[in-house]
Image: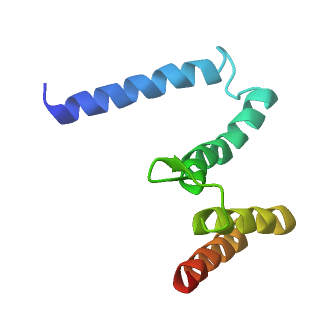
Amino acid sequence: MSAWAWILALGVGTFAIRASFLLPRGQGEPSPYVKRVLQLVPAAVLSALVTPSLFVIDGALALSWTNERLVAGAIAALVAWRTKSVMVTLVVGMAVLWAARLLG
């Protein structure tokens, strides 16, 4: 069996296993609880991916104002809390990060 066939088979198998828990037998719609939990998955995954890069530099914990990523992340978090807009948060966070790198 070729590598691509294995990748496809494993992907279909993984999807089928995960989908079997989300869709109860005999029903086409997941429960409201499952829907609510699934709505939170993208935010949880994004947080898990971004958070380590904010607090760790070169394998060491960096909790100071000289850490431009931490400063930009904190300001972006405040913008997200106030505006509830993903696009505004991304633009402000990146602008602060670029400005901090240019000035620092």
Q: Is residue 101 above or below residue 53?
A: below
- Colour style of the rendered protein structure: rainbow
Is residue 67 among what the camera can see?
yes
In the foreground, 20 or 57: 57
Residue 25 vertical position relative to residue 54 in the rendered view, above or below: above
Give coordinates of residue 82: x percent, y percent.
86, 67
- Horizontal side of 66 relative to 36 (left or right) equals left
Looking at the image, which residue is at 47% across and 23% down? 16
Residue sitting farthest toward the top: 25
Depicted 60 relative to depicted 90: above or below:
above
Instruction: Please state the horizontal and vertical placement of residue 76, each as a whole percent of the image.
Output: 71, 67
Residue toward you, 73 or 23 = 73
Residue at x-position 63% and y-position 48%? 47
Quarter of the picture holding the N terminus: top left
Q: Residue 26's spot in the image, x, y percent?
A: 67, 15
Q: Is residue 85 visible?
A: no
User: Image quadrant of residue 45?
Assistant: top right
**Residue sitting nearer the eye, 85 or 1:** 85
- Residue at image location 13% in from the left, 30% down from the top: 2
Residue that sits furthest to the bottom in the current view:
103
Residue 73 spot, x, y in % from top left: 67, 63
**What is the residue that sits farthest to the left in this orientation?**
1
- Whether residue 13 sits left or right of residue 19 in the image: it is left
Count how many numbered circles sit on residues in the image.
0
Residue occupying the far right of the picture: 82
